[in-house]
Each structure stands twice: as C-alpha cells, then as structure tokens.
Image: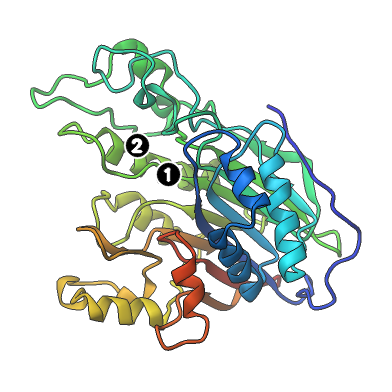
Amino acid sequence: MIFRLLFLGFTLLAGAVNAQDRLRFASFNVGLGRDGPGALLKDIQSKDKDILALAAIIAEISPDVMLLTNFDTDYRNLAVQAFIELVRLETSEEYLYFFAPEGNSGFPSGLDLNSDSWLGDWADNWGFGLYPGFESMVLLSKFPINLSKSQTFPDYLWRDLPNASQPKNPDGSNFFSVEVWRNYRLASKNFWDVVITLPDSAEIRVLASHATPPVFDGSENRNGLRNDAEVSFWGDYINQSVPQSTYFVILADFNADPKDGEGLGFAINALRNHPRVNDPAPISMGALQASINQGGINLRQSGNPATDTADWADSEIGNLRVDYVLPSSNLTILQSGVFWPEPEDALFPLLEASQTAHRLVWVDVSLP
C-alpha cells in the first residue's frame, strides 16, 4: 500500500484552534466525483463555482482535521494538492498534511460480483466507481500524520467480519458464488486508522470510511447488508484493535440513518451506542426548517430531523442523517454542529452554489 503525505509548510494559521485546548473534527461529502480521470483537477484549476463554495464552507467552519468523501483521487494526488492550494489561496485556510491512499472504488475485482453472468462492468468493481479513485476519500489535517503508525484495510474480507451475513436469493440459496464470497472485499472505499500527532506529542486516531449506499440492488439486499457490515467493522475494530486509553474520532459517511431510509439500522445504532463511542448528534436549524417545509416531521415517528446531514428533497429519499463525527467516550465534547444555514441566513447562498447534497458535520473535543 502506497501512502502519500504532503507537507505544505511549517507555520499554522494564527487563528487555528490550540490543539491542547480544543480540536475540531469534521466530515464532509463534497460531491466531487467527475465523469472521467483528470476532470476534477481541471475544474479545480478553473475555479469552478461549486468548488469555490465548498472552499468557503470549509473556511467558515475551519476544522483542524477533516475527512472529505466523494472526492476523485489520482495516483499522483494532483487533484488533492490543487484543492488544498485553492482553499489556501481563496480563504487562507491552510492544511499542512493530507492522507489519500488508494482504495477499492473503481478497481476491478475480476469477479462477477453482481451475479449477472457478465464480467468487467462497473458493478464488478470492488467499490462503485467508473475508474480507480472515483469518489474516493481524503483526510486533511493541520497537524502531522504519523504514517508509520497509520493503517488501511482495503483487503479486509466481508466473510471475516464476525457474524457476517451473506446475501440470499428468494429461495434461500446464496446470492454470491463460492469464489466471490471467499474473496469479496468489505470496504467499498477503504477503512483507515490514521494517527495524528498533536503539538504536545499526544496522539489521536482518526477512524475513517465511506460505506456503500444500501440501495441499487435486488431482493437479496447485497448493498444493504454490505452497508451494515461496513459500519459494523468499526465496532469490532474498536473492540479488538484499539486500546482502552486511546483517543479516537470516527469520521464517516456511513450512508445509514439511525431511524430512517433504506439502511438496516442495526450497525449504525450499535456503533452510536457503543460504550467507547460518544454520539453528540449535531443539529442545525436549516435541517429542521427543511424537514418542516417538506412535511417530513410528521413522517418521522422517532428521531430528530434537525440532525439530518443530507438534503435529497427532490427525490423520494428525503433528508437523512448519514454523515458522522463520533468521538471516543474518553474525549470531552465541547460543541458540535452541521453547516446547514436557513434560507434567510447570509451563508445560505453557499449551499445553493455547492452541488453536494451533503452538509459539513463538525465536533469540537478536548483531551482530558
């Protein structure tokens, strides 16, 4: 596995949060997937208005560590570097380090993953994607990333997850062939355990992933089961591989709402209620207002629509909570939120200019 680290400078912004007092973590599905390799780099260099709006949103919240999902990556990370430079030049928000190893999105499996008797179509890639790196992930940090301690798990097998459920046909037979199930990778993008080194030499780990949407399948519900399994990975990983004294923050687009949507809901609720995980359930008045405008409040029998993080108002999906920042329970949560201003807010035009359906989710924590 190739790890790439970009060092952009030595001086933190004067207004950056003091790491010993407060750290701001964020997860943001930026919707920067394009139809072909190199297209995103071209749009960044052209200062596409959508990308400028995303940069302004990031600067408004100013996270110290942030996971970007649905970001097209390339082997040389040219698009990542160009985006970081655009953010710096347009907003003075500076990210000194990034982490963007290759994952599974758009990489051919060589197997018939969707059991349609054809090989080589996009559904046979390990993760959804038109080409390698399509709608992948990037971690941006204002603090150093310890590559020697960081790990990724793109090759982790679905069948190796405890209590893994294999998709079934209506007659009860296995949907996948024996060969497919034996080799099926669980991560549709990747699983990352990234170690961040703070100025006082303390360390905090970022556990990052982006699960497949629990839709676009058939009665076998292979994507729904895979989505639930991808979320379950982290509960098992914390139990098996993360020492009790470790500080960590889970950053993810899990494509799973705790109460609503097409996801199974079991894994996301188990993770939110894990004894070593703290769910601050960030809210925004914009999400609440959007739900009221759509009549969604009366449709949701439980949960809080103000915690929604994605706006699919123009489809049958509606608004859902799918983006997460979940600190470990040994961290103190100071503040949290979702960047979703109401229509009358001066910042609302940034949402209109950006083309992503998702909202930036952030949480401030302090080390004990």
Extreme-right residue of the structure:
10
Residue 257, given in percent of the width and then of the height, sits at 32, 59
Q: State which quadrant residue 96 falls in.
A: bottom right
Q: Which quadrant of the rendered structure holds the N terminus?
A: top right
Q: Residue at x 12, y 23 (%)?
A: 172
Name the kind of residue labelled 2 in the image. Answer: Arg
Compared to residue 214, the image places residue 311 above or below, namely: below
Residue at figure coordinates x 30%, y 51% from the top left: 266
Q: Are marks 2 and 1 in contact (CB under 8 Å)?
A: yes
Q: Is residue 188 visible?
A: yes
Where is residue 79? Give x, y as percent. 66, 44
Q: Nearer the viewer, residue 44 or 189?
A: 44
Q: Which residue is mark 2?
A: 226
Identity, as a three-letter code, of the amino acid under mark 1: Ala
Which of the colour schemes (rainbow, by chain, secondary structure, one colour) is used? rainbow
Residue 166 appears at what percent x and percent y?
A: 28, 27
Whether residue 359 is situated above or below residue 105 in the rendered picture:
below
- The numbered disc on residue 269 is none
Work out whether 285 lies above or below 151: below
Mark 2 secondary-structure assignment: helix
Residue at image position (67%, 31%) is 75
> Label 2 crowding class (10 Å Cα cut-off): few <14, some 14-19, many 20+?
many
Q: Position of residue 339 (x, y in %)?
A: 50, 74
Point out the tag, 2 or 1, that comes first from the N-terminus. 1
Q: Which mark is residue 211?
A: 1
Q: Quadrant of the C terminus?
A: bottom right
**Residue found farthest to the left:** 171
Instruction: Identify the residue at image location x=15%, y=71%.
Output: 299
Label 2 vs label 1: CA separation? 8 Å
- Can residue 241 be seen in the rendering of this structure? no
Element type at mark 1 = loop
